[in-house]
Amino acid sequence: MFDVKTVPLDADVMLARLRPWIELESPTYDKPAVDAMTAMAAADMEKMGFSVEVIPGPEGLGDCARASFPHPKAGEPGILIIGHLDTVHPIGTLEKLPFRREGDKCWGPGICDMKGGNYAAISAVKALAEMGHETKLPVHVLLTSDEEIGTPGTRALIEAEAARHKYVLVPEPAWGRNTLVTGRYAIARYHLTANGRPSHAGAALSRGQSAVKMMARELLAIEEMTGEDCTFSVSVVHGGQWVNCVPTVCRAECLSMAKRQEDLDRGTERILAFNRQNDDGTGFVVERSVVRPVWEASAGTMDLFERAKRIGLDLGFELSHASEGGGSDGNFTGAMGLPTLDGLGVVGANVHTLDEHIEVSSLVSRGRLIAGLLADLD
């Protein structure tokens, strides 16, 4: 009888093998860096016994990797593990956030979101093979390159790959020690552009109209629309080139999130109403960018959670579930109606900051949880 507690995973060994992943920085917009990270992950998966195909990335973005583990039912619908290899941390973050361990905590850029979870998941596949346990369904892995910017280039790839399978597992970070994610909020991104009027800032200030000032005014108004039904957050602001010139262009990005699709749609109507074009060429432009659809738990997803809950009890902890903000590629597969379980990755805290870290022991606990699901699903 299969005993999930005996799945051969060792936290120290896993962390040592994960370290090169963390020390290979891979911010989304640095294509060579992400390509190198994908190549490293592909090579490690091949060493574990996976067959791996590196897929050229979308224009300007990094490569992706698709992998499958040997199985007698290869080619039939099975289990898809999806994750991303890009991070929000720019090259050089390692100087401020070096890989270091203190007791059960370990720090590093991208270690929690989500390189640690990715590594735990592929290790679970290998560990089952090492103990001679063949999964009932074939297992596939898809690692992508642009999740941190809303998946503008790989959504079609994810949806096409997911449509070939029965279940989707997403090892994004666990938002609580004993929690899993069974739904995610709807998310939309917008490009904001303020167009001003040029002038010399010293000799003829009053003749100009500052795009930066316009953006500051509209930024405050947009963020003040935030309520319990829908949030608005403006960031990545760039404006002007010379301090002695009235800035004529200022650009920013806005992230909006809602628990329900209809709330996000109403939010979209409100922010698009900021669009205006004046006769003199000045004005404010709002352009809709990438969108993640709301994912509400289906019966299939809840069945996945109940299976995970039983496995968790076997491992000595009781799991709960929730719908969460902070979108993931699980939004897409969940919205497709595919049974999807998210938040299966490592336990940690402070993702996207210079204090991003994991609980080292969760490499094993979450790895065994994933292994239990892989062994149970049919």
Image: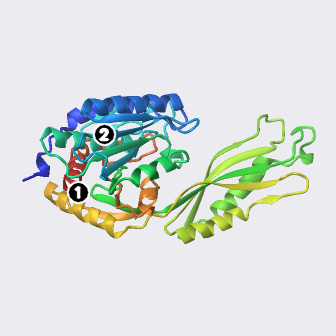
First of labels 2, 1 by sequence position: 2
- Name the residue: 80% across, 60% down: 276
The quarter of the picture where the C terminus appears is bottom left
User: How many C-alpha atoms fall within 10 Å of the one at disc 1: few (<14), some, or many (≥20)?
Assistant: some
Residue 122 image-quadrant placement: top left
Whether residue 227 is visible, yes or no, is no
Q: Position of residue 64 (x, y in %)?
A: 44, 38
Q: Nearer the observer, disc 2 or disc 1?
A: 1
- Name the residue: 48% across, 64% down: 294
Tell whether 347 sits left or right of 156: left
Tell whether 7 sits left or right of 121: left
The amino acid pointed to by label 2 is: Tyr
Q: Position of residue 131 (x, y in %)?
A: 12, 41
- Name the residue: 54% across, 32% down: 30
- Name the residue: 49% across, 67% down: 259
The amino acid pointed to by label 1 is: Leu
Q: Position of residue 246 (x, y in %)?
A: 84, 42
Q: Which residue is mark 2?
A: 119
Relative height, residue 372 to residue 65 (above, below):
below
Q: Which residue is mark 1?
A: 377
Whether residue 52 is visible, yes or no, is yes
Q: Nearer the viewer, residue 69 or 110?
A: 69
Count of all numbered marks drawn on residues in the image:
2
Relative height, residue 165 to residue 90 (above, below):
below
Cα distance between the residues tagged 2 and 1: 20 Å
Q: Position of residue 104 (x, y in %)?
A: 24, 41
